Image (cartoon, rainbow, N blue to C red):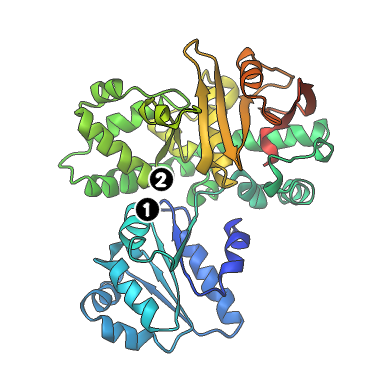
């Protein structure tokens, strides 16, 4: 069963363009299935398509050892789709040569942004467009878990209108309740396709264990050239307990047994392989941002819950607030909002969860996972200091709007996007 992905709509306008398309994301996020679907759709339009995976040694060796023979092989095709491109040595340099000397449209995929965006990207400047395919978003999860709710959301709530969401498009109490129930199931096991499509809790846990052991341990251990993964596991588990909090490098170093320099290196690899992300604080003085401690979030909550061995329902957990704040980060990631994402914290510890900078406007976003209107002192402080036009409070199921001075504050249930 193929689950349609939101990325299909984003990538569609670029299929006919000349640039190479790069699909990056974590292992097991569905990249191979996604690009095979692209190949199938192109073939239905009578396009000549060649699908290659560099997991096959013969294809990889041909590309690496005899680029002219590879060129001869693919030159008759209109589209060449290459999976697991990160395995190619000097892949970017060779891909540039093929791009410049053929009329073939290339689509490549890989599971590490280190290889595809840096090693390959530096040769393909102006020739390549990057897209991320992450684990299922909540809406993608709904598309096969509750088709009725999914169709309702698709009709009423446009994911492109997050900052401009019209409260009039909200739902009533019963629909909100159903959405909450589905969202709270989703955040426990996350969005890795093989996990989300598993039917029992035992299957979901077993599948998550396989992803963690074969991906987190095996792949990242290889990237870091580690003899043992013990310190990597300790670091990952400590980060899993710290979601939504400012990280202190000294604490991470002490908890994992890594030196300060090695801690930074491990964090970089965890980010580049889509395990977790760091966001910086918001300051009007940009130099200050570079020196301040970031906050960390996991790209998939199922993997995070596996690391701390806690799959209890949200109502039974004392980290429910942190889980939903992490979900809010993942939501913003799926909406392509995270490029300008920060958090705000003052010396007096006033804090707003997320700050979006867009076209010289700033938008404070706070997560209050409750069923009533709550505006914290920190949110008031931010409005008073920066005077944003719009502020957003993401709630459990409360929907509303209020004017604070000249700022329109919207209360939007987290499950709407």
- Res 113 label: 1
Q: Is residue 308 left or right of residue 219?
A: right
Q: Quadrant of the C terminus?
A: top right
Labels 1 and 2 touching (C-beta < 8 A): yes
Give 316 or 35, whichever is nearer the viewer: 35
Q: Position of residue 193 (x, y in %)?
A: 51, 51
Q: Secondary structure at mark 2?
A: loop
Few, some or many C-alpha atoms within 10 Å of disc 2 (few <14, some 14-19, many ≥20)?
many
Tag 2 or tag 1, which sits nearer the N-term? Answer: 1
Write the residue at 52% across / 24% down: 344
Q: Secondary structure at mark 1?
A: helix
Task: Name which quarter of the figure residue 102 lies in.
Answer: bottom left
Q: Is residue 31 visible?
A: yes
Image location of residue 320, percent across then percent down: 55, 23
Name the residue beneath numbered marker 2: 274
Q: Is residue 211 above or below residue 32?
A: above
Q: Give percent across and percent down for residue 113.
A: 37, 53
Residue 36 sits above or below residue 378 on the image: below
Left or right: where 117 falls relative to 78 = left
Q: Residue furthest left?
A: 227
Residue 28, given in percent of the width and then of the height, sits at 43, 53
Q: Label 1 neighbourhood size at 10 Å, few (<14), some (14-19), many (20+)?
A: many
**Which residue is painted at 81% across and 33% down in the image?**
174
User: How far separated are the C-alphas under marks 1 and 2?
Assistant: 8 Å
């Amino acid at each position: 069963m193929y689950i349609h992905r939101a990325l299909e709509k984003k990538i569609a306008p670029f299929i006919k363009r000349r640039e190479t398309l790069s699909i990056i994301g974590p292992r097991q996020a569905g990249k191979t299935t996604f690009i095979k679907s692209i190949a199938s759709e192109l073939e239905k339009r009578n396009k000549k398509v060649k699908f290659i995976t560099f997991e096959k040694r013969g294809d990889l060796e041909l590309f690496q050892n005899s680029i002219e023979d590879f060129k001869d092989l693919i030159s008759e095709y209109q589209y060449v789709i290459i999976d697991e491109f990160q395995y190619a040595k000097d892949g970017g340099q060779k891909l540039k040569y093929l791009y410049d000397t053929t009329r073939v449209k290339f689509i490549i995929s890989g599971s590490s942004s280190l290889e595809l965006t840096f090693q390959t990207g530096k040769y393909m400047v102006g020739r390549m467009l990057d897209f991320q395919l992450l684990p299922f978003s909540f809406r993608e999860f709904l598309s096969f878990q509750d088709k009725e709710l999914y169709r309702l959301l698709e009709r009423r709530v446009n994911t492109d209108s997050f900052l401009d969401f019209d409260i009039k498009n909200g739902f009533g109490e019963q629909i909100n309740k159903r959405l909450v129930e589905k969202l709270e199931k989703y955040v426990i096991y996350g969005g890795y396709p093989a996990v989300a499509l598993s039917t029992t809790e035992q299957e979901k846990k077993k599948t998550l264990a396989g992803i963690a052991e074969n991906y987190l341990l095996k792949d990242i251990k290889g990237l870091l050239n580690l003899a043992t993964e013990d310190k990597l596991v300790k670091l990952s588990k400590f980060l899993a307990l710290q979601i939504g909090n400012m990280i202190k490098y000294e604490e991470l170093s002490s908890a994992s047994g890594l030196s300060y320099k090695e801690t930074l290196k491990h964090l970089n690899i965890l980010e580049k392989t889509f395990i977790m992300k760091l966001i910086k604080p918001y300051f009007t003085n940009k130099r200050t941002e570079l020196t301040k401690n970031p906050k960390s979030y996991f790209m998939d909550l199922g993997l995070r819950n596996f690391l701390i061995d806690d799959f209890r329902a949200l109502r039974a957990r004392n980290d429910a607030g942190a889980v939903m704040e992490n979900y809010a980060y993942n939501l913003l990631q799926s909406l392509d909002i995270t490029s300008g994402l920060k958090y705000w914290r003052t010396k007096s510890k006033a804090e707003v969860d997320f700050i979006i900078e867009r076209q010289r406007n700033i938008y404070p976003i706070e997560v209050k996972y409750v069923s009533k209107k709550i505006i914290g002192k920190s949110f008031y402080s931010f409005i008073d200091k920066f005077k944003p036009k719009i502020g957003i409070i993401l709630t459990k199921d409360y929907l509303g709007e209020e004017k604070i001075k000249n700022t329109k504050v919207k209360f939007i249930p987290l499950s709407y996007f």
